[in-house]
Image (cartoon, rainbow, N blue to C red):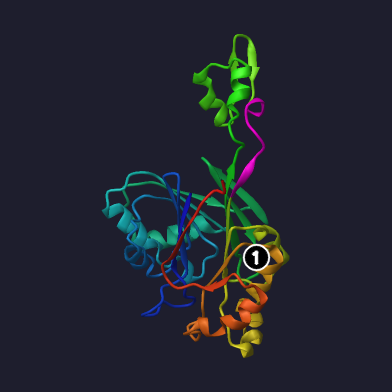
Amino acid sequence: MLDVCLLGTGGMMPLPYRWLTSLMMRYNGKSILIDCGEGTQIAMKEKGWSPKPIDIICFTHYHADHISGLPGMLLTMGNAERTEPLLLIGPKGLTRVVNALRVIAPELPFSIECMEIEDVNQTFTFDGFRMEAFKVNHNVLCYGYNMVIDRIGKFQLDKAMELNIPRNYWGILQKGESVEYEGKVYTPDMVLGGARKGIKLTYCTDTRPTESIKEHAAGADLFICEGMYGEPDKLVKAREYKHMTMYEAARIARDAGVKEMWLTHYSPSLTRPEEYMGEVKKIFPESIAARDGRSVELKFEE
């Protein structure tokens, strides 16, 4: 199960009724944050989640509304007596940007590791899941992310017993590791069925529509995408500043065959995004104008 919370849905500046876009996910004891604009800490407190156990923070790009909350977040983690290392992932320049921001957060009781994305597409693998970064089209270097949880095949008890594999080796094989017993090597494929459907979440903001977004979002259980403008006369502005309209996001969701789309990163001028959802849903019916704190538990299909 993947816990998901869209902490904030605003773009450019925090508003009294809308925090800046940030996503937090929890899976298998790990917490992952994507983007950390001003006010993210408050949005997190409103949700009732704590920044202390955050293990990974990913950044789409280095505009202030996506990273300016980092120094305060680091200080809060430090004040909570965190000692575990923190991993940061982001486009090239991450180390330089973080070091500059840390001028106001210089002393921390934990270490920070920066991993910079080097390629157009890059995968970061962790215990039980992976983060896939893919380049999008903004006016600065910017990436979208996939959170992917693969699920191996179901353990075949009859096959394990038929092969006389001792019970104490079953768990190892279930984890996808081979074992050796009485001179024979047993591999996971001997006792596991075919791979089962996992969980996939795609997060994408601050970009024009691109083929890479459609390709990487294909089949996602949840597609969280910017819909900065809903007003029909804002398409020219979206093109000029390399953002996306709600309708463009809906077309990507439709073409990528995702299960559900949450719109986010609204312009400050877009005070009531739900007013435009009628036309959006004509393009992709499973569209939602997300509000701050929208949450879901994504579960494995049985």
Q: Which residue is mark 1?
A: 136
The relative height of residue 151 versus residue 7 in the rendered view (above or below) is above
Residue occupying the point 32% across, 63% down: 45
Q: Nearer the viewer, residue 167 or 73?
A: 167
Residue occupying the point 51% across, 60% down: 59
The relative height of residue 64 versus residue 162 in the rendered view (above or below) is below
The answer to whether residue 191 is magenta is yes
Secondary element under disc 1, as helix, strand or loop, is loop
In the displayed structure image, the side of residue 80 where residue 119 appears, left or right: right
One can see residue 84 in this view: yes
- Image: magenta residue range: 188-198
The answer to whether residue 41 is magenta is no
* Residue furthest top as drawn: 182
Asked which quadrant contains residue 39, the reply is bottom left
Residue occupying the point 41% across, 67% down: 293
Residue type at mark 1: give it: Val
Image location of residue 28, percent across then percent down: 45, 44
Image location of residue 48, percent across then percent down: 32, 60
Asked which quadrant contains residue 211, the reply is bottom right
Q: Nearer the viewer, residue 273 or 20?
A: 273
Q: Nearer the viewer, residue 221 or 133?
A: 221
Image location of residue 166, percent across then percent down: 53, 16
The relative height of residue 152 versus residue 230 in the rendered view (above or below) is above
* Count of marks overlaid on the render: 1
Image location of residue 115, percent across then percent down: 53, 50
